[in-house]
Image: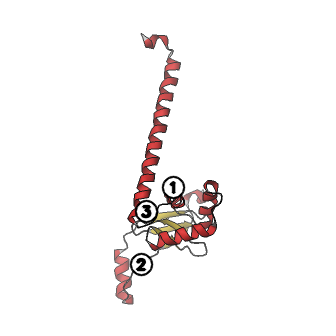
Amino acid sequence: MLLKTFSVKRLVQFVKLFLWHNLLKCEKILHKREKMDYIAALQNHSLKVTPQRLEIVDLLYKHGHMNVDDLYKFMQQKFPSLSLATIYKNIHKMCETLFLSEVKIPNQKSVYELTKEQHAHVVCTKCNAIVDVNLNTTSLLDEVTQKSHYHIEETAIVFNGICPNCIN
């Protein structure tokens, strides 16, 4: 009987509103869960949990790779009194504990990312977009070790090219 008093149009609006409201609630829960995961991750690396460090983690999680200047611009919106020195100190400490990795891109400022499994980077020479690429480097490492007799401790592979967006 209740359905007869509502027009189909109003019923559709109600359902959309209901779904939208529940989606927002789910996003808040997921964001809260992400923050809790960030806290645990920082603590697992023996890092003090601060609002600034949580924001750095959140930005790098969302953007993938960022240099200090870009981090500073984004963080100034949330923390207007934040100094560039504070960001450098936090980045340095987070790299020191291997929570973050520095990616040195030739002819550009270093960018930082959350530490992940070994991977290469592809950088667009037009727009500077950076993409992670998982490669099997085992045979390459074996060959380098065999030819150089070095014990390889770290690899940093960066490819340069033009991304699909810039090609079009």
Residue 42's tag is 3
Residue at 41% of width from left, 65% of height from top?
Answer: 116
Q: Which residue is disc 2 drawn over?
A: 154
Give amino acid for label 2.
Glu
**Mark 1 burial class by Cα count in 10 Å: few <14, some 14-19, many 20+:** few
Residue 149's tag is none
Of the two numbered discs 2 and 1 on the same chain, state the one appearing first in sequence: 1
- The answer for how far apart the CA atoms under marks 2 and 1 are is 26 Å
Image side of residue 30 versus residue 82, left or right: left
Q: Is residue 125 visible?
A: no
Q: Which residue is disc 1 drawn over?
A: 62
- The answer for how far apart the CA atoms under marks 3 and 2 are is 23 Å
Of the two numbered discs 3 and 2 on the same chain, state the one appearing first in sequence: 3
Give amino acid for label 1.
Lys
Point out the image quarter for the N terminus: top left
- Give percent across and percent down for residue 125: 60, 68
Helix or strand or loop: what does disc 1 sit on?
A: helix
Vertically, is 2 above or below 13?
above
